[in-house]
Image (tube, rainbow, N blue to C red):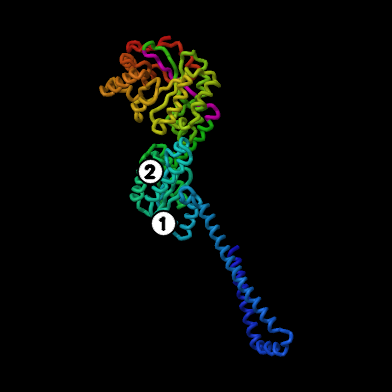
Amino acid sequence: MRPLRVGRATRDAAALIFVGILFFIGAEWLDLYERLAAFLGRHEFIQADELFIALLIVGILGFVFGYRRLHDLKVEVNHRRRAERDVSWIAAHDPLTRLPNRIGLKQQVERLKEDGKAGKPHMAMVIDIQGFKRINDVHGNEIGDEILAVVADRLRDIFIGCYLFRLGGDQFYAAQETPLTKDWEKLARRAIKQIAEPIEIVSRYYEVSAYVGMARYPDDAANIKYLLRCALSAVAAAKRERSKEPKWFDTAIDEATAKHAELDKQLRAALKSGDVRPYYQPMIDLTSGRIIGFEALARWRRSDGSFVSPTEFIPLAEETGMIGELSQILFTQACHDAAKWPRGIRLSFNVSPAQFSNRNFGRQMLDTLAATGLSPSQLEVEITESMFVNDVQLVAVLLDELREAGVHIAIDDFGTGYSSLSQLSRLRFDKLKIDRSFVSSFLDDARQAMIVRAMIGLGRGLGMKTIAEGIEEASQAETLQLLGCHQGQGFLFSRAVPAEQAISMLQTTWPVRPENKTATS
């Protein structure tokens, strides 16, 4: 519309100027001024000169009025143009970080095409912030927004002279016209390092980390528009591999990404169809050899009878945010199964760090116990030390809520996480679980044996039961029992089995002496 208005105004001005010139020429040719003066002199009695002066004054005032209205119109037009620019800026930028968004990225790509720069070598990078969602869930959106704003400022300081965008959520995108691969890698490593620096907000420190995926044009992408997709595939691969190094795109990543997406689709369908179910591995009293409980473990059995390894689908569920739904389905089914066991048999259930970011998690767990009829005293919740890194105060509140209801708390994978002793001194646990990495080699490694002995002594001193996982040999079970370890689990006794088979083995007794290696019923 604007070019049409400008063209019409130009035509109107040209027409008026042309009419004015014709009028001036005609007046000059007719001696209009002399004729008008003579007429006014002959007809003084009708006061025509005063009328002419009045008309002249009205004309001058009308000109001034028109000029002022024209000035007001110009101001209004400028305001409208500025508002249009503001709306366009808002549409193309993220209001929190003030970085261009996906629309801004698309506009930048179009500008590069128009300027003929789209064919030049480009480097691209996607920075995926880890830990942001947890902070957002636990501490609220305001803290999360502050974290993102600080991260954006750090990225601005790193990517000077580069294009920088916020793709949305916790992802950023950087690009530059350059063929220098090594320089781009240096920027990526610098970004990973600086993002991991603690962030202080209201006298409290928060920590996040970053995965980085990179791609090159024209080496990786068919065009500059496809470059973002390649970088996204690379960062997805870095997250799957838990890589703290920048990850370059390659064709194998594309295949892995497609496989990852297909597994994600299948997992969602499996959760709905009930193909993911809890299996139960017995926990054995090392003195009596009898079952004192079962640990519920996730197992995904496909319709063809094959199993998907938990090492594949559990990290996938955590990455895609399905871990909460998966755990709730497993926990509900496990409670239904455990409600059929004798009262003295306990159900042990692992809780992920993602679940403990939900302040209502404890109440939801107790509601499930009530709905399924399982006594809280029959439940044992296993948590890992990594949970304390997130928010020890929230974890303490949730654990206290469960303990007050009668639920037992065990610390899993002890010695492999963070700040073990400090957390044991601050929080109350009922059981300490010795990780399989210590159990597998303690008979042949004197240092490992000392560590295992120290763990058992620590548990005894703090009034906790100790359980060793990963027991595969009778000699391991016997030695652990002699050292004072109360319970054990592992392939020596049984693998994880379906619920029906778990019930049938309740009367089984396992001797822990090395000379008796077969279970008896």
- Report the amino acid beneath label 1: Lys
Q: Position of residue 514 (x, y in %)?
A: 32, 13
The magenta-colored residue range is 270-286
Crowd rating for badge 2 (residues with CA inside 10 Å; few <14, some 14–19, many 20+): many
Q: Give me the disc on residue 195.
A: 2
Q: Residue extending furthest top?
A: 521
Q: Position of residue 279 (x, y in %)?
A: 47, 22
Residue 159 visible at all: yes
Q: Work out which quarter of the rendered image holds the C terminus and state it.
A: top left
Residue sitting nearer the eye, 426 or 151 = 426
Answer above or below: position of 151 versus 56: above
Residue sitting nearer the eye, 172 or 231 = 172
Which residue is at 34% across, 50% downward? 183
Residue 259 visible at all: no
Residue denoted by label 1: 120
Secondary structure of the residue carrying tag 1 is loop
Q: Position of residue 116 (x, y in %)?
A: 45, 60
- Report the amino acid beneath label 2: Ile
Query: Looking at the image, do the residues carrying marks 1 and 2 touch, with CB atoms under 8 Å apart?
Result: no
